[in-house]
Amino acid sequence: MTQASAAVDARHDEERAVGLWADAFRRMRRSKAAIIGGTIVGFFVLMAVFAPFLAPYDPTRGNLAESYLPPFTGDHLFGTNVQGQDVLSRIIFGARLTLGIAVLSVSIGVTVGGILGATAGYFRGWVDALIMRGVDIMLSIPGLLFAIAVVTWLGRGVVQIAIAIAIINIPIFARLLRGSLLSLREADYVIAARSVGVGGAGLLVQHMLPNAIGPLIVQATLALATAVVDAAALGFLGLGPPDPRTPEWGTMLSDTYRYLNDAVYLAFFPGIAIVLSVLGFNLLGDGMREALDPKLRR
Amino acid sequence: MAKFIIRRLLLLIPILLGLSVLIFLFIRLLPGDPASTILGERATPENIIRVREALGLDRPLHEQYFAYLGGILQGDLGKSFLTNRDVVDDFLQRFPATIELTVTAMTFALALGIPLGMLTAKRRGSWIDNGGTILSLLGISIPIFFLGLMLKWLFAIQWPILPDSGRIDLITYFFPRVTNMMTVDALIAGDWGGFVDALRHLILPGIALGTIPLAIIMRITRASVVDVLNEDYVRTAHAKGLKEGTVDSRHVLRNAMLPVVTVIGLQTGLLLGGAILTETIFGWGGVGKWMYDAVVANDYQIIQSGVLLLAFIFVMVNLLVDISYAFLNPRIRYS
């Protein structure tokens, strides 16, 4: 009988989970913010994936005879930089690097932060205390400063940048998941599941995590926005990829700010790319939050 | 109240200790031989010996840590490996410039963010509200360094009405440095022209640094005012015939400010990080520019101690915010 009721309980849970996601998706399609944000993000993802087919030129090949060509004239839509590299091609290929760093760093942040948060929220006691004090310490260092320190420590490189940004994210996700799990412990269906003998990892994985994942996804989307800005900030500060030919949006801005007087377009176009992609992730995250927030469900 | 403050202060101890361990390990656990990594191209045998001695790398790790901790407690955070100058002296000399900049940015954010948040909340659903929402979204999404560059290009190069960098026109204005905050020093010296010039230098970096907090404060104020407007006591205040302005200032704003206070504390961390970018763009001689120069020069001692000092300030500001929050909201004190 215990087994039977657990099975009923599980099936019931599953139905409800599907219901939540279907409902969230339906609500997202009606949310203007989510649609606009999703479109912008989709645009940049396509740009990153099909960069070799979209970019008119090789982003790393320069031609000094063609340096400083102004935008909207001739063959280079967004002009060329000091080395005569095509700015548009560098922005298109830069999307790969920036989005890649953002996705990699947030994935590491969600995974490590999630494991820490789940461990703390599930075991409680001294494990919880230990992990959460560690999280407090990490949160006491201003984010960008932490990332700068980590990159100077690990050395320059794409993976190093992703790790540095992931480290800013770990405490945020750990706190979030722990908070959700703690409030879920008291939820009726969790108490019900436990009373019919579901325990240990099963309770955590089958009953609690699926219900805690909504806020985590929203936060991950918003974290992608921050990650794009932080990656570009590191690039701007000269801590970007070590090979100067690598197209990276933040590095492109820092390359040009010395020539602001006569070549503002060199800063303008990569800057707009950063703003748009960040805006896209922010809108998508906001839209998702509204769609997934049970309080707003009707 | 005293109990609350003491409890919060005690909670700080493990955090500060943990922070010191983390930052202590930063240099000691540098990949490879720390001394030669620190020195990089400057690694001559004499230099390596000097750095090893300065760090006490030959002693066991725990002894090194206690020596380091003892140094911190006496205000000794080591010397720059490059200039051999005392890190704390350098920091204290530059920090007032950063305070001046962050206070300007925060003032800008609060002075615009709270009224705009209030306005959009009261006109919910109108075009003002929609415009405000779009503006705050843009404000959150625009990186400091891009905004800074564009402001500089627009108002200092293309249409040169404001200075493009520095803190004051050093050729025209000279007055003794007392606090190292230009505006304050100019006032102390009674140099009115210098004060105005210092203010003009603050405008562009202040806006660049203050825009993200502005957008966030505007959002939080709007959300918080919308909540309060639905409260019974606001309806009662209206019902008993109080003037609109009185209801807003006495009842709505005062209650809606609580979440905003918390945000101010959290934003400080962002401002301290953002100061690195802003100060670099506008050649502002504060802690941020100092940290940037240290990063460029790989001066690990400055990076290490700078992070520790700024994290300490961040923690302290948040403590003050928590205390003022408890002061404003009796419900927190007793929980």
Image: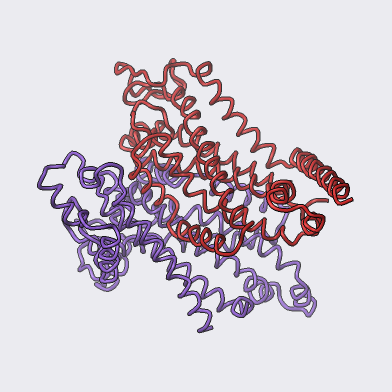
Chain colours: A red, B purple
Residue toward you, B192 or A28: A28
Residue A270, given in percent of the width and then of the height, sits at 45, 33
- Give the vertical position of A253 relative to B324 (above or below): above
- Give the vertical position of A206 relative to B246 (above or below): above
Q: Is residue B127 visible?
A: no
Q: Horizontal placement of A147 versus B193: left or right?
A: right
- Give the vertical position of B55 relative to B44 (above or below): below
Residue toward you, B248 or A109: A109
Residue A176, given in percent of the width and then of the height, sits at 61, 54
Q: Is residue A81 visible?
A: yes
Q: Residue furthest bottom?
A: B2
- Give the vertical position of B145 relative to B109 (above or below): above
Residue in view at x 60 percent, y 66 percent: B259
Q: How many marks?
A: 0
Q: Horizontal placement of B148 versus A112: left or right?
A: left
Residue toward you, A100 or B15: B15
Residue in view at x 49 percent, y 44 percent: A166
Residue in view at x 52 percent, y 39 percent: A275
Residue B264, given in percent of the width and then of the height, sits at 51, 64
Residue B136, given in percent of the width and then of the height, sits at 58, 51
